[in-house]
Amino acid sequence: MQYLANYNVTSNDDLQPIGATAVYPLPLYSLKYKSPSALPASAKVAIPNDAINQARGLLVLQSAGLVTLKNGGSAFSGTSDIETKKVDVVTLDASQTAGALQAGSVAVAIVNNNYATSAKLDKAAAIFKDDPASSSAAPYVNVFVARAGDKDNPTYLKLAALYHDASVEQGVQQSNGGTAVFRQVSASDLQGLLKTVQDQAVAAGK
């Protein structure tokens, strides 16, 4: 959803979500420390440098008690919004955070699910993660999208609904290490959420 909002605002388009799929947790990994509270002062933390994953990563760090963000943070927060910190935040390409952790150049790292799988990071090394079922994770749900004129197309809506067939969900979990949290949200509710996130994007100057 976050990518869609950003695309619509920056491209002056009006694509609309017609079905929700799943949200995946965004974990904080460490190969040395067992909890965020165990991190020493000024430990280096790698987070993705792209705007969307950076904001979510910062929200994870805030939930873990490692930083505080201006006005509580949002889906458009950046490193300039850090008001207080117990760690030193380093921004890297999302594909490089796992490697930085494994090389020992950072103490902990935010690693997206696909890169964690590729790097063969043990799920037990995740010392914190956001709650993909929470309201704050709602903007990060993956969605089916259609042109605005097709948002009520019954065939498209049926196709989107098929994602939640039990056999499909089982296949999704098998291919993602059981990390998916499925979200069933009506098209109208998704479209309302999209408008909210787009308004936030405009206010943030995206």
Image: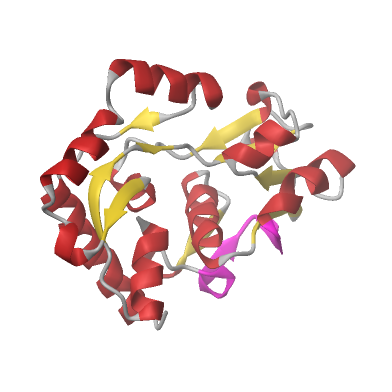
x, y (%) of residue 79? 58, 69
Q: Nearer the viewer, residue 85 or 6?
A: 6
Total marks drawn?
Answer: 0
Left or right: 142 as drawn, with respect to 162: right
In screen coordinates, is 51 left or right of 115?
left
The residue lying toward the viewer, choosing from 30 and 13, is 13
Q: Is residue 57 left or right of residue 47?
A: left
In this rendering, is residue 67 above or below 102?
below
Q: Quadrant of the N terminus?
A: bottom left
Relative to 6, does residue 161 appear above or below in the rendering?
Answer: above
Query: Which image quadrant is residue 131 in?
Result: top left
Residue under the point 68% across and 27% down: 125
Q: Classify the position of the C terminus by image quarter.
A: bottom left
Which picture quadrant has residue 113? top right
Residue pushed farthest front? Answer: 155
Indicate how the structure is coloured in the image. secondary structure
- Name which residue lies at 56% across and 64% down: 84
Decide if residue 163 is on the left or right side of residue 109: left
Q: Residue at x 86, y 50 (%)?
A: 105
The image position of residue 122, as x and y in percent, is: 70, 24
Q: Which of 6/81 is in front?
A: 6
Residue drawn at x 72%, y 43% is: 108
- In this view, 132 is above or below 196: above
Rendering coords of residue 130 (x, y %): 46, 40
- Residues rendered magenta in the picture: 78-93
Judge whether residue 87 is colored magenta: yes
Give the main secondary structure of the magenta stretch: strand
In magenta segment, residue 143 = no
- Percent position of residue 90, x then y: 72, 61
